[in-house]
Image (cartoon, rainbow, N blue to C red):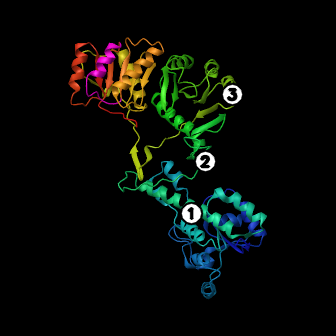
Amino acid sequence: MNSLKQAKSALISVFSKDGLAPIVEKLHALNITIYSTGGTEKFIKELGIPVVPVEDVTSYPSILGGRVKTLHPKVFGGILNRQNNESDVAELAQYEIPQLDIVIVDLYPFEKTVASGASEQDIIEKIDIGGISLIRAAAKNFADVLCVSSVNDYENFLDILTAQEGSFSVADRKAFAAKAFNVSSHYDTAIFNYFNQDHEIPALKVSETKGKVLRYGENPHQKGFFFGNFDDMFDKLHGKELSYNNLLDVDAAVNLMNEFTNDDPTFAILKHNNACGFATRATIHQAYVDALAGDPVSAFGGILISNTKIDKATATEIHKLFCEVVIAPEYDTDALEVLKGKKNRIILIQNEVALPEMQVRTCLNGILLQDKDGKTDTLEGLTYATDTKPTDEQLEDLLFASKLCKHTKSNTIVLVKNKQLCASGTGQTSRVDALNQSIEKAKNFKFDLNGAVMASDAFFPFPDCVEIADNAGINAVIQPGGSIKDQLSIDYCNANNVAMVFTGTRHFKH
């Protein structure tokens, strides 16, 4: 089954020539006949290596501006014939079709062309037809043909080609076939998603070709995997491998801090996907100190993120805390030396990378897909619901609290004072419970809630929350509004000089 079969011929038709020269030289050294076309043929000739033009086999030139080069029975017959089938072998001889044992293809860069912002005409021209057909044919016939389907596989192929002197086992060919179908299915997925950007066709196609096995999933008895290009988004400077839970927390931290990218120095501490400490200050050192003061107990083992460079003074404070991950756009050199003092502490530099605009999660026996909540409440979008209007300082705190609320698990209430998170009630089944939880936490950590503001992720169906907040000293509220009983909360606020604004936008996070 795994006996070696000597290759006698190879068809090469690639976009990327990087790393191709050593392969061509080795094929020639092994007396393997090389067929090629177009730019690849020219490249091989310039190496001084003999190559048979495909059009000499097909007796047909490349036509339509290069759109049709290899699409011919004499090419695909050479790939798809079954060498243990007498009829197939006879037909090869009858029609003078050369046997092709190796097919090397690298497709036009469709995804890179789309990402570059190219015109639709340029994008369409980068939809590979001949190449993808060669890949599918060669991979299908892995019993006789070895298919190299990407520049990423050149090195591996060259190693095997050299070690086995041009001979390959069925296991070799089948392994490359699996890679080939991975390439072809991913390529078709990218093309479909380009044409279906508005999701007019109710179909979900997701393809991630870069995967990583994690130590385990959410718990040690669960398997875990990450699919995506983590290295594009982060430079990992130090620490252990990120776990499944680390990645979820890092995702929550990044999405939250994206709301404050261009703000004054801002620091967040997250635990179980929710912010337990958050502050904006004149310096990142003070922002960290005040963020930690929000809940120094929950901060233990948390995820830390800054919207600006971390200096040595801040790193020295962070070093006193056991934390899993620290994220920042950059670090001072001496700050890094301090943070690296804990062997397992994960230190990341966050790069500017576009995040997906859609969210996907499994549900029942299917999948849920939705737009990411990309709406941020702004001053211009507020409706002033009460006679008492918030001051400019209160408006800043209200919008600050609203951003935090958007990224906290529902039901949630967030309490803020002077751009510092005092406390939040997270993931409660009752909004009253969420409020009571947040007030109790704030008091436990010695916050004075007089003059604080409150944000809610959804409307108040009853006036109980504004009354509880008022009794705690909170005198400004931001909420979506939209309850048929909004007036009850408005009436209470008017009677007690509490300012309340409506955003018109609910921010549930389940």
Asked which quadrant contains residue 231, the reply is: top right
Which residue appears at 40% of the width and 51% of the height?
197
- Identify the disc placed on residue 340: 3
Q: Earlier in the sequence, mark 2 or mark 1?
A: 1
- The residue at which mark 2 appears reads as 212
Left or right: 214 as drawn, with respect to 165 = left
Q: Give the range drawn in magenta.
A: 457-472
Q: Quadrant of the C terminus?
A: top left
Disc 2 residue type? Lys
Which residue appears at 54% of the width and 73% of the height?
71
Left or right: 441 as drawn, with respect to 7 = left
Left or right: 192 as drawn, with respect to 53 = left
CA gap, disc 2 and disc 1? 19 Å
Above or below, 419 relative to 146: above
Asked which quadrant contains residue 33, the reply is: bottom right
- The residue at which mark 1 appears reads as 181
Q: Which of marks 3 and 2 is nearer the N terminus?
A: 2
